[in-house]
Image (tube, rainbow, N blue to C red):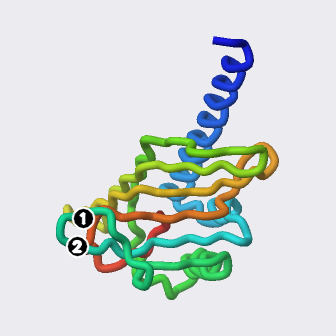
Amino acid sequence: MKLSDREDELEELLVEREVRQFLNHEAELLDARELHDWFDLIAEDISYYMPRRLMRENTAGVFSDESYYFDESYGSLKARVMRFDSEYAWAERPPTRTERYVTNVVVTEYDDEEVDVESNLLVYLSRADSEDHDFYSAKREDTLRRDGDSFEIADRTILLNQTILSTDNVSIFL
């Protein structure tokens, strides 16, 4: 292996480590309900999208272009974050307890400005004193944009594994 090949490999490992640390930090903020700090990680031109999975015979990875659980922008995400501070966040009374597991992080492409990332997400959810709990399992496709020593989320597509949600609503951020 040439020295330049070795240097390229080391650079890729460092980028992947930075991305992993960023995604873990994001998960910690969301699990701790530090929503304003999480929102600081959002780019002003974000697309935050979760299409519905469709069931078709002999295919598993088909998603709707016309139907989605949410299709958010910077403004709508900001409104949702602000709503959690108000008396109108009924779906979060009492608050949902979550634990996020971000795994299989793969940097698919990067340059000095942006990093494209695929990851798997498992979210455990529970509420109040109930023994009931739910899980969301999804693949995420993110574009992270360099922002100083960190990143901001410029694009996120969430591809949920479920075709039917077992919860009454999707009031958390994925």
Query: Residue 170: horizontal and vertical position, in percent?
Result: 39, 75
Give the residue displayed 37% in from the left and 58% down from the top.
Answer: 138
**Amino acid beneath label 2:** Arg
Label 2 close to label 1 by CB (< 8 Å) = yes
| Residue 41, quarter of the rendered image | bottom right
Between residue 89 and residue 114, name the one nearer to us: 114
Give the Cα separation between the discs numbered 2 and 1.
6 Å
Q: Quadrant of the N terminus?
A: top right
Query: Residue 101: horizontal and vertical position, in percent?
Result: 41, 47
**Amino acid beneath label 1:** Thr
> Does residue 12 lie above or below 44 as drawn?
above
Query: Residue 43: horizontal and vertical position, in percent?
Result: 71, 65
Please indicate whether residue 155 sits to the left or right of residue 168 in the image.
right
Give the residue displayed 29% in from the left and 74% down from the top.
Answer: 54
Q: Which residue is mark 1?
A: 59
Between residue 169 and residue 95, name the one nearer to us: 169
Q: Which residue is mark 2?
A: 56
Between residue 37 and residue 62, name the one nearer to us: 62
Q: In what element is the residue under mark 1?
A: strand
Between residue 35 and residue 2, name the one nearer to us: 2
| Residue 36, quarter of the rendered image | bottom right
Give the residue displayed 64% in from the left and 31% down from the top.
Answer: 12
Give the residue displayed 72% in from the left and 54% down from the top.
Answer: 145
Q: In what element is the residue under mark 2?
A: strand
Query: Residue 27: horizontal and vertical position, in percent?
Result: 51, 52
